[in-house]
Image (cartoon, rainbow, N blue to C red):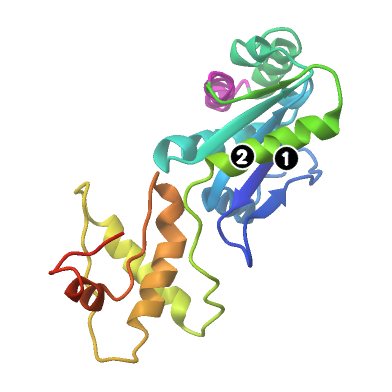
């Protein structure tokens, strides 16, 4: 099971809890994959039977991909399971993975991908281990820790504007074309065209990918007060 905290919300952080039940042969939903990619943090709940679900393993593999490619925060929870069992696929995880390798003997790349994802997730430094005790207190601790580790918050809700989303995607595609570590993109035009609204929407779409983020308003006017400098 995985829980994603998305940056696309109305007032704060939106939680996507995946509890769907799929039959054999069904594939992970593209909608869910996009939700994972747009999330600020993924919390993975490992139980003893986790590796028996190809759905969970596919989610996990995509989460690890996002962690490496998009710097997404990933935090595993080991619910009554030894983290080493997950990392090295021992005990119930060994049995489950052996069954999957037999099932996918014609496509062992899947099993190798899942084994790698399990090892990577279990080796992350930030993790919670629940063996016994009060689950409510344990959940409160997780919520507090996750909230403290989240990247900067998004700007206030801009609301839905017709035609804005395609322009946001176009700007992001231009940013993605740059191979430089520092990228600058200008948006120009007469007043009232929606340049600031577009910039805010782009910021809200990508800020969670960075450790720090800041949106500066009215730079020209603010800099006049401090001899050409801007105070943060």
In the rendered image, the residue lying farthest to the top is 91
Q: Magenta stretch: give its range.
A: 105-123
Q: Are marks 2 and 1 in contact (CB under 8 Å)?
A: no
User: SS at mark 1?
Assistant: loop
Query: Could you tell me residue 128's position as x and y percent?
Result: 67, 24
Residue 134: mark in rendering: none
Which residue: 18% across, 68% down?
226
Task: Say which label, 2 or 1, has the lower sequence index.
Answer: 1
Residue 7 horizontal/vertical position (percent): 55, 56
The answer to whether 97 is drawn above or below residue 167 in the figure is above
Q: Is residue 226 visible?
A: yes
Q: Position of residue 41 (x, y in %)?
A: 57, 43
Residue lying at 60% horizontally and 10% vertically, measured from the top left? 88
Q: Is residue 154 left or right of residue 181?
A: right
Mark 2 or 1: in front is 2
Q: Residue 43 location in percent, x, y?
A: 64, 37
Asked if residue 121 lies in the magenta stretch, the reply is: yes
Label 2, label 1: how far apart the Cα atoms are: 34 Å
Instruction: Check disc 1 and report the residue beneath it.
Output: 25
Within 10 Å of disc 1 (Cα), the crowding (few <14, some 14-19, many 20+) is few
Q: Is residue 59 visible?
A: no
Describe the element under mark 2 as helix, strand or loop.
Answer: helix
Does the stretch in magenta take in 133? no
- Relative to 94, residue 232 above or below: below
Q: Nearer the viewer, residue 4 or 200?
A: 200
Tell me if 71 is positioned left or right of 11 in this view.
Answer: left
Residue 146, numbered circle: 2
The quarter of the rendered structure image containing the N terminus is top right
């Amino acid at each position: 099971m995985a829980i994603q905290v998305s940056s696309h919300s109305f007032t704060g952080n939106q939680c996507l809890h995946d509890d769907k039940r799929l039959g054999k042969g069904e594939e992970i939903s593209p909608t869910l994959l996009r939700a994972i990619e747009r999330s600020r943090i993924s919390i993975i709940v490992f139980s003893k039977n986790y590796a028996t679900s190809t759905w969970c393993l596919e989610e996990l593999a995509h989460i690890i991909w996002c962690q490496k490619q998009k710097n997404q925060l990933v935090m595993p929870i080991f619910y009554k399971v030894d983290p080493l069992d997950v990392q090295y696929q021992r005990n119930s995880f060994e049995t489950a993975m052996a069954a999957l390798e037999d099932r996918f003997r014609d496509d062992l790349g899947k099993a190798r991908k899942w084994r790698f994802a399990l090892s990577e997730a279990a080796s992350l430094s930030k993790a919670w281990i629940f063996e016994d005790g009060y689950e409510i207190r344990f959940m409160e601790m997780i919520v507090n820790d996750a909230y403290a580790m989240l990247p900067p918050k998004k700007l206030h809700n801009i609301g839905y504007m017709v035609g804005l989303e395609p322009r946001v995607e176009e700007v992001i595609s231009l940013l993605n074309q740059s191979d430089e570590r520092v990228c600058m993109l200008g948006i120009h035009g007469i007043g009232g065209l929606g340049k600031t609204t577009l910039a805010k929407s782009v910021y809200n779409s990508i800020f969670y990918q960075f450790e720090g983020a800041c949106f500066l308003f009215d730079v020209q006017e603010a800099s006049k007060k401090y001899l050409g400098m801007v105070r943060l």
